[in-house]
């Protein structure tokens, strides 16, 4: 009799163990299904601006041309002081803070304070990108990280009078960014090297443009 009871108890214990294992496996299966469903419905695809020859797109993969266009877009808008740098620079940093890394945002705010102390904000500013995209302007560094070279002109005015009109070269770093507020999936992460003047290069590009469009 004792042996029979022990056998029944052992069987019942085994059944309960199997039930617990089945419940755990079912919970893991539901969790995995939820993860797969979420990923299938939340994909980021970076579409190149020029689709004349088609394109092979992979979710999450950033093309060099996308990194270049992104760098131009953000940097140009941060330097577009249509009213006055006293108001616009700080406002633009707030507006584009999700498209720059927190480290670069801190640099921008320090730069804004420095320019305010030096009296360099009481003016309007326009930054223009001089070159169309070329593959050599972007260097892939792996992991969707890019070094982007921009050749620009900066024109500043005070009461409509031009006080600065210079060519500037920027080497900007573009990195992946998965913060919820960043809908672009990438962010400016600062300068690879300090910005430099590039008047000769800017003048050469302007001269060629004038020659093509007399």
Image (spheres, grey):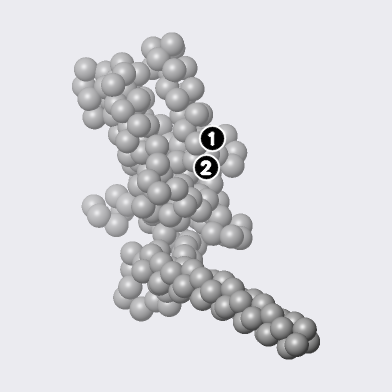
Judge left or right: residue 148 versus residue 212.
Answer: right
Q: Position of residue 71 (x, y in %)?
A: 42, 48
| Residue 162: quadrant of the picture | top left
Q: Earlier in the sequence, mark 2 or mark 1?
A: 1
Secondary structure under tag 2 reads: strand
**Is residue 13 depicted above or below 83 in this figure?**
below
Q: Which residue is at 27% across, 18% downward? A: 158
Q: Which residue is at 47% across, 72% downward? A: 30
Is 186 or 166 nearer to us in this picture? 186
Secondary structure under tag 1 reads: helix
**Is residue 87 depicted above or below 129 in this figure?**
above
Q: Residues within 10 Å of mark 2 (few under 14, many from 20)?
A: many
Q: Position of residue 136 (x, y in %)?
A: 53, 59
Judge left or right: residue 180 versus residue 26.
Answer: left
Q: Which residue is at 43% across, 61% downward? A: 65
Q: Residues within 10 Å of mark 1 (few under 14, many from 20)?
A: few
Is 120 or 109 nearer to us in this picture? 109
Q: Position of residue 88 (x, y in %)?
A: 29, 26
- Residue 154, numbered circle: none
- Residue 103, numbered circle: 1
Is 100 or 70 nearer to us in this picture? 100
Q: Which residue is at 61% across, 77% downward? A: 16
Is 171 or 182 nearer to us in this picture? 182
- Residue 189, numbered circle: 2
**Is residue 73 depicted above or below 89 in this figure?**
below
Q: Position of residue 8 (x, y in %)?
A: 68, 85
Decide: marks 2, 1 in contact (CB < 8 A)?
A: yes
Q: Nearer the viewer, mark 2 or mark 1?
A: 1
Q: Could you tell me if residue 213 is visible in this image?
A: yes
**Quarter of the picture holding the N terminus:** bottom right
């Amino acid at each position: 009799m004792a042996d029979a009871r022990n056998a029944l108890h052992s069987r019942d214990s085994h059944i309960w163990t199997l039930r617990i294992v089945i419940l755990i496996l079912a919970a893991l299966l539901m969790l995995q299904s939820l993860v797969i469903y979420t990923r299938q419905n939340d994909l980021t695809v970076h579409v190149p601006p020029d689709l004349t020859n088609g394109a092979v797109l992979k979710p999450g993969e950033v093309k060099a041309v996308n990194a270049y266009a992104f760098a131009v877009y953000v940097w140009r808008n941060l330097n577009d002081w249509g009213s006055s740098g006293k108001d616009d620079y700080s406002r633009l940093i707030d507006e584009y803070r999700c498209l720059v890394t927190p480290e670069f945002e801190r640099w921008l705010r320090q730069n804004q304070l420095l320019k305010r102390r030096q009296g360099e904000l009481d003016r309007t500013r326009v930054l223009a990108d001089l070159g169309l995209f070329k593959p050599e302007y972007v260097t892939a560094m792996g992991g969707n990280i890019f070094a982007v070279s921009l050749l620009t002109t900066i024109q500043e005015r005070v009461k409509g009078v031009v006080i600065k009109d210079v060519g500037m070269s920027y080497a900007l770093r573009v990195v992946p960014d998965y913060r919820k507020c960043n809908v672009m999936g990438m962010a400016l992460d600062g300068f690879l090297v300090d910005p430099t003047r590039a008047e000769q290069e800017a003048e050469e590009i302007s001269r060629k443009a004038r020659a093509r469009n007399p």
